[in-house]
Amino acid sequence: MLKGRAHKFGDGISTDHIISGRYAHLRSNLPELAKHVLEDADADFAKKVKHGDFVVGGNNFGLGSSREHAPLVIKIAGVSAILAKSAARIFFRNAINLGLPVLICDTDKINNGDELEVDLAAGTVKDLTSGEKLTFGKIPGVMLKILNEGGLIPYIQKHGDIKV
């Protein structure tokens, strides 16, 4: 069970919004890079986010380049999952491979600052602030196993090959 506060963003949050190219020189210093996560969408996000919080987006979250740094710095900042109406495919897979769930659901009823509780196995989001209950598509078993191990590399290091 994941629990935290919602940080709401709109549609079309690109990988450049997540981590601007002007910080490319920090790619070898991920903790420093994470201090700038999402600052082009919300200048204070990195200061406000707490461990376990959620990024809530609209349509086409993570569009743009295939930089793995984008989902990785979101995770390093302490975000436990991303909820969005839709996500770019490469961003989605990069996030899962790095151990960051991307949950596709109707985010219209989630407000900035709402307290959320997410059950990955059940496919449910409870908005503890408003009382709303949302669902997202069941995460395939192999993806849940990858997420539970913290990403694809830790999964393979522990279990060897992926068994589907």
Image: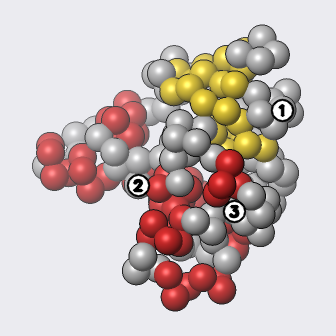
Q: Nearer the viewer, mark 1 or mark 2?
A: 1
Q: Nearer the viewer, mark 3 or mark 2?
A: 3
The residue under label 1 is: 111
Specify whether 10 is left or right of 22.
right
The residue under label 3 is: 38
Q: Is residue 155 above or below residue 111?
A: below
Q: Disc count in the image?
A: 3
Q: Is residue 17 above or below residue 152?
A: below
Q: As drawn, which residue projects farthest toward the front?
A: 47
Which residue does the image show at 60% across and 82% down from the upper left?
A: 23
Cα separation between marks 3 and 1: 18 Å
Cα separation between marks 3 and 2: 18 Å
Which amino acid does the dot numbered 2 rest on? Leu
Q: Is residue 69 above or below residue 60?
A: below
Which residue does the image show at 53% across and 72% down from the upper left?
A: 33
Neighbours of disc 2 within 10 Å: few (<14), some (14-19), many (20+) = many
Neighbours of disc 3 within 10 Å: few (<14), some (14-19), many (20+) = many
Confirm or deny contact between disc 3 and disc 1 (CB under 8 A): no
Q: Secondary structure at mark 3?
A: loop
Specify whether 27 is left or right of 151.
right
The residue under label 2 is: 98
Q: Is residue 126 visible?
A: yes
Measuring from the top left, give residue 68's x and y in whole percent.
49, 68
